[in-house]
Image: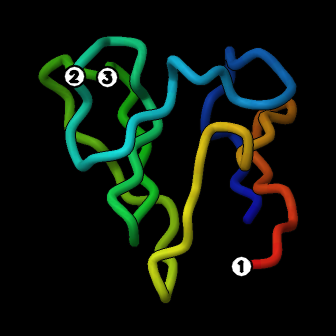
Amino acid sequence: VVLGRLVPDAVQGVLNADAFHFGSEATTAEQQFLYDGRTLSYDADGSGSGAAQAIAQFDGNPVLTADDIFMAQFAFVMRERLW
């Protein structure tokens, strides 16, 4: 999955574990990528008042962690993985 211009100021490389949360709502400001077992969402302000936006949906409830998300300039790329 590649989405352009999603996080313009993101550090390139594997997503920082603090930016990922398993659940549908962030509990800290750092948790911007949320995964509930089916939907990956991006929340620009983490636990702030802004709403998370769905960016990808998966079938079969695959296991997904911060290590599976690679940040590239103006986009994020999910590394290929066999589930």
Q: Residue at x 68, y 15 (%)?
A: 9
Q: Which mark is nearer the camera, 1 or 2?
A: 1
Confirm or deny contact between disc 3 and disc 2 (CB under 8 A).
no
Q: Which mark is nearer the camera, 3 or 2?
A: 2
For the residue marked with disc 3, what is the amino acid?
Gly
Question: The C terminus is located in which quarter?
Answer: bottom right
For the residue marked with disc 2, what is the amino acid?
Thr
For the residue marked with disc 1, what is the amino acid?
Trp
Q: Which label was assigned to residue 25?
A: none
Q: Residue at x 72, y 45 (%)?
A: 69
Which comes before the other along the chain, label 3 or label 2?
2
Which comes before the other along the chain, label 1 or label 2?
2
Residue 39 vs 21, above or below: the answer is below
Q: Which residue is mark 3?
A: 46
Nearest the viewer among 54 and 27 is: 27
Residue 63 position, x and y percent, is 55, 63
At mark 3, the secondary structure is: loop
Confirm or deny contact between disc 3 and disc 1 (CB under 8 A).
no
